Amino acid sequence: MLTYQCDCGATLFFDSTHCVACGLDCGWCDSCRRIASVKVADGVKHCGNPDCGVVVFPCVSAVNWSACNALVGKEGNLCRSCVTTTDLPDLSQGMHLPRWRLLEEAKRRLIYDLDRLGIAWEINQPNLTFRFLADTPEEHVITGHENGVVTINLDEADPVAREKARQEFGEPQRTLIGHLRHEASHYLWQTHVQGRDEAACVRLFGDHNNPSYSEAMPAYYEQGPPDDWAEHFISAYASSHPWEDFAETAAFYLDMRSVVETVGQHFGRNNAPVGRQSCDTLLANYSEAGFGLNEVNRCLGLTDALPEVVSPPVVEKLRYIDSLLSRPVG
Ligand SMILES: [Zn+2]
Ligand SMILES: [Zn+2]
Ligand SMILES: [Zn+2]
Ligand SMILES: [Zn+2]
């Protein structure tokens, strides 16, 4: 993620609400889409980005729940990320509020990813919306995507439960942003592939109708992935069905863009902006970053930051996704 600079010279981060050096308020300006300081003139707050300067108010989710750092143009409004959440857990219960905040924080990063790609998620049909829900005695909440609606079980924001699930499923990583990128990628299949580009997608990912999803998933959970999955897929789970392959590969593509943009700014690289890098250049920059970042994590006894190995068939799938997402949906 890019960082920004306060007027005092200190660094401001994507989630900053104030500058830790000079104390100035700041936030994510929904208008110019960057972190900016808040300037007050005649009692009115303005975005401190000199190229923007719009009148700003805190997102109402920041006012009510400290669950956002966005600045909006109208008092009492939700920002363009918070407004996509249609269903919340009961925030009076136990750990629901801090866990929901983590989900909103991860979602703001996903919205940033989609905006940087020029995905018109507010206009494309269906729109993209989110439900963050906790299990009840009557209902277990299943994380997934259906017709533009992403549902995430609040337990995923519990680090102990998430690590337990990661171990059970043998995953190298399990994160909130990873879940959101995966589920949003199912959404991207619907908006960009379904009824538009299915034949090309089937050639690379396989026929999503044969076997059907309802046949393939129980078989995957019973038999597990094929031994040689890494030669064809970005993850073991991607081998379960072509839809999951697309979602896992597109989520990796979003990871890759985010990592390359971050490394480009913070590791003294002189890369072109991510949006102007070819898929092959992105991959090369990602791989190079992986060597260094993984060694840093190993120095600290942490799991690899970038664990994926990208085989030639996966490169083909990534090139397809890169080309697909750069096309407008008309
Ligand atoms: Zn400052
Ligand atoms: Zn602004
Ligand atoms: Zn907000
Ligand atoms: Zn999925």
Image (cartoon, helix red, strand yellow):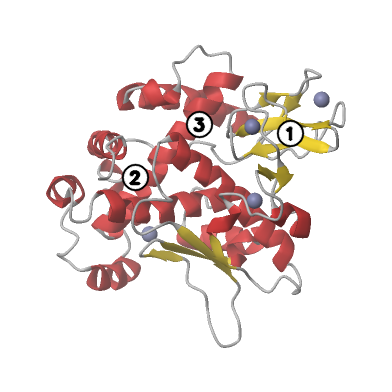
| Foreground label between 1 and 3 | 1
Residue under the point 64% across and 30% down: 299
Where the C terminus falls, by quadrant? top left
Element at badge 1?
A: strand
The answer to whether 206 appears left or right of 169 in the picture is left
Residue under the point 76% across and 40% down: 17
User: Marks 1 and 3, how far apart in space?
Assistant: 31 Å
Quadrant of the rendered structure where residue 268 is? Answer: top right
Instruction: Please state the horizontal and vertical placement of residue 155, each as a whole percent of the image.
Output: 61, 67
Q: Say few, some or many: other residues with alpha carbon within 10 Å of mark 3 (under 14 / 14 to 19 / 20 or more).
A: some
Up-down relation of residue 31 to residue 194 (above or below)? above
Which amino acid, mark 1?
His
Point out the tag, 1 or 3, that comes first from the N-terminus. 1
Query: Looking at the image, do the residues carrying marks 1 and 2 touch, with CB atoms under 8 Å apart?
Result: no
Furthest-bottom residue in view?
138
| Foreground label between 1 and 2 | 1
Is the CB–ligand 4 distance for label 2 below 8 Å?
no
User: Marks 2 and 3, how far apart in space?
Assistant: 15 Å
- Total of numbered circles in the picture? 3
Query: Looking at the image, do the residues carrying marks 2 and 3 touch, with CB atoms under 8 Å apart?
Result: no
Up-down relation of residue 94 to residue 41 (above or below)? below
Is the CB–ligand 4 distance for label 3 below 8 Å?
no
The answer to whether 222 appears left or right of 168 in the picture is left
Which amino acid, mark 2?
Thr
Q: Say few, some or many: other residues with alpha carbon within 10 Å of mark 2 (under 14 / 14 to 19 / 20 or more).
A: many
Name the disc covering residue 259, or none: 3
